[in-house]
Amino acid sequence: MNEKLEFAERLRAAMVGAGMEPRPSVLERQFNARYWGKSVTFQAVSRWLKAEAIPGQDKLQTLAEILKIEPEILRFGEKVRSSVKEQKARWDEGIGYLERETFDAFLKLPAEQRKVVREVILTFAKAYGS
């Protein structure tokens, strides 16, 4: 499915979930009352709801606050949350205390030394065919 279409569907569903009628004039009024930047036009909001455009990050933040939904869920859907959880689980599974201690020490190093350590690790990884 089209990214803009998926966003528009999530936006309309979030509006309904927040007790709002999914119409541009309703969202425009709510949005402009809360947004700190330049007001958006009826046409801009209409384009969001018609799957013609996706708002920028600053506007997504405001929309998410109005609709009481996480901005990343509004922008990308629930699949982003499960993807992040899968990545985190995969990361956590193979790491024991010694690896965590090593990562913590690595992160405390100055950037130049981290670069050297990274290069050494990548060299070993290439040599051992990971």
Image: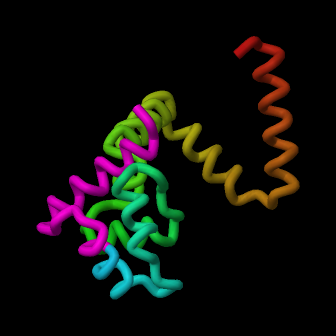
| 2 relative position to 104: left or right | left
x then y, percent, for residue 28: 34, 76
Q: Is residue 19 magenta?
A: yes
* 109 or 51, nearer to the observer: 51
Q: Which residues are magenta?
A: 1-27
The total of numbered circles placed on residues is 0
x then y, percent, for residue 50: 36, 53
Q: Relative to 128, is 90 above or below?
A: below
Q: Quadrant of residue 84?
A: top left
The answer to whether any part of residue 13 appears in the image is yes
Residue at left offset 42%, top offset 59%: 47
The answer to whether any part of residue 92 appears in the image is no
Q: Quadrant of residue 111?
A: bottom right
Residue at the extreme front: 43
| 126 relative position to 27: left or right | right
Residue at left offset 51%, top offset 71%: 58
x then y, percent, for residue 82: 35, 38
Residue at left offset 70%, top offset 16%: 130
* 66 or 72, nearer to the observer: 66
Q: Quadrant of residue 27?
A: bottom left
* 8 or 115, nearer to the observer: 8
Q: Relative to 43, is 35 above or below?
A: below
| 100 relative position to 18: left or right | right
In the picture, which quadrant includes the N terminus?
Answer: top left
Q: Relative to 49, is 119 above or below?
A: above
Residue at left offset 57%, top offset 38%: 98
Q: Is residue 114 magenta?
A: no
Residue at the extreme top: 129
> Mostly what secondary structure, the magenta segment?
helix
x then y, percent, for residue 33: 34, 87
Colour scheme: rainbow
